[in-house]
Image: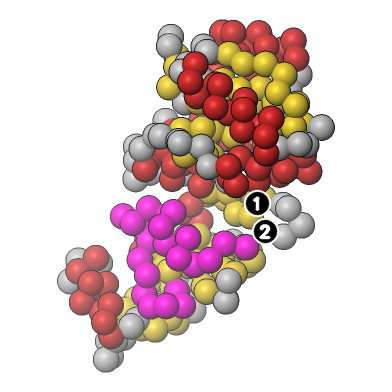
Amino acid sequence: MVKVLTVDDEPKNLRIIKELLRLYCPNATHIGEADNIETARQLINELQPDLVLLDIEMPHGNAFDLLDKIMPVNFEIVFVTAFDSYTLKAFKYSALDYILKPVNIDELKAVVTKAEHRVNEKNINQQLSFLLQNMKQPSVALQKVAIPTFKDQLEFIETDSILYCEASGAYTFIFTENGNKLVSAKSLKEYEEMLPESIFFRLHHSHLINLNKVKKYHKGRGGEVEMDNGVFLEVATRRKDEFLRRIGF
């Protein structure tokens, strides 16, 4: 059984989540609830939950203030939020789970099941550390990203170390400046949405490049870019004008 603690400053939300857990998550037991970060901190110490469903905005502080006080942790955290797009992007960078309000039953069931199979202290603390770092950065300067590979592993790399991303069906190859090639379970479109638009550009359906790592542009119908590692990548004709604008031509 997954021991679940809920943290939310709205009594209605606490009641709804508790009832949804009772009705739809037979593998979970609700062990307590808190409506502020201090009570949450005390209950986490006392009850030792497996999973904390954590609202972001609360009285006298927020979820990130709580995380600063309790890390390192040995339980899963899922954020329950109606927060803005920048925060959601930070979650994606850190590969942390979140549920948007109002809570969807299927999403709740999925995160409880995942928590049952994945209490991984090393990963969760790295993910939370990167989340807190990324939340303190300007909105376009998120510095690190968690790459979900296979066997439920995460690899944490600096965003600007990425040379380019290459589509491979439902997967993505990520090439870095140190010569590594990572295989990610996320699609290229997901990386296009996640990585900062100020730095990354979609050349065509197969490649998303780091503009800071372009060595040369070779003219042609669409043309080609030469990356810092010597690899040549084609520019789609329909993307040529936008690409030239982005590099200052």
Inspect the magenta stretch and tell me whether residue 34 lies in it: no
The magenta segment: 185-207
Name which residue type carries label 1.
Glu
Rendered image: mark on residue 149: 2
Residue on which the image places disc 1: 155
Q: Are circles 2 and 1 on residues that touch, CB within 8 Å?
A: yes
**How far is disc 2 from disc 1 in space, using C-alphas?**
7 Å
Q: Crowding at label 1, few (<14), some or many (≥20) Cα neighbours within 10 Å?
A: few
Extreme residue toward the bottom, this view: 221
Of labels 2 and 1, earlier in sequence is: 2
Can you give x and y, in whole percent of width and height, for residue 184 in the image?
62, 63
Label 2 secondary element: loop
Q: Is residue 70 visible?
A: yes
Q: Quadrant of residue 151?
A: bottom right
Residue at 42 percent of width and 30 percent of height = 136
Name which residue type carries label 2.
Thr
The quarter of the picture where the C terminus appears is bottom left
